[in-house]
């Protein structure tokens, strides 16, 4: 590959803001993931009772 093509691919991969998205709040994302996992754990334990 040529240097021009590699430079263009690097600029596309990095994006205009270095790849950081302000809309993705790490606390909100982690909290939502934790809530979903706890909900799945609760559902699994409710359906896994011995009869």
Image (spheres, grey):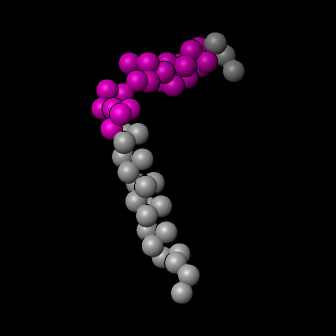
Q: Residue 37: x and y, percent?
A: 45, 54
Is residue 24 visible to the viewer in this orientation of the structure?
no
**Rendered view: 9 above or below 28:** above
Q: The N terminus appears in which quarter of the rendering?
A: top right
Q: Residue furthest left?
A: 23
**Rendered view: 45 above or below 31:** below
- Foreground pick, 2 / 23: 23
Q: Residue furthest bottom?
A: 51
| Residue 23 sits in quarter | top left
**Rendered view: 49 above or below 16:** below
Apparent side of residue 6 relative to residue 23 in the rendered image (left or right): right
Report if residue 24 lies within the magenta region: yes
Q: Residue at x 36, y 27 (%)?
A: 21
Q: Residue at x 33, y 38 (%)?
A: 28
| Residue 29 sits in quarter | top left
Q: Residue at x 31, y 26 (%)?
A: 22
Q: The C terminus appears in which quarter of the rendering?
A: bottom right
Q: Residue furthest top?
A: 3
Q: Residue 25: x and y, percent?
A: 33, 32
Q: Residue 30: x and y, percent?
A: 41, 39
Q: Which residues are magenta?
A: 4-28
- Foreground pick, 8 / 19: 19
Q: Residue 4: x and y, percent?
A: 59, 14
């Amino acid at each position: 590959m040529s240097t021009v093509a590699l430079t263009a691919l690097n600029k596309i991969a990095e994006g205009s803001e270095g790849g950081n998205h302000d809309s993705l709040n790490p606390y909100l994302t982690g909290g939502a993931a934790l809530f979903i996992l706890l909900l799945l754990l609760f559902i699994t334990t409710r359906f896994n009772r011995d009869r």
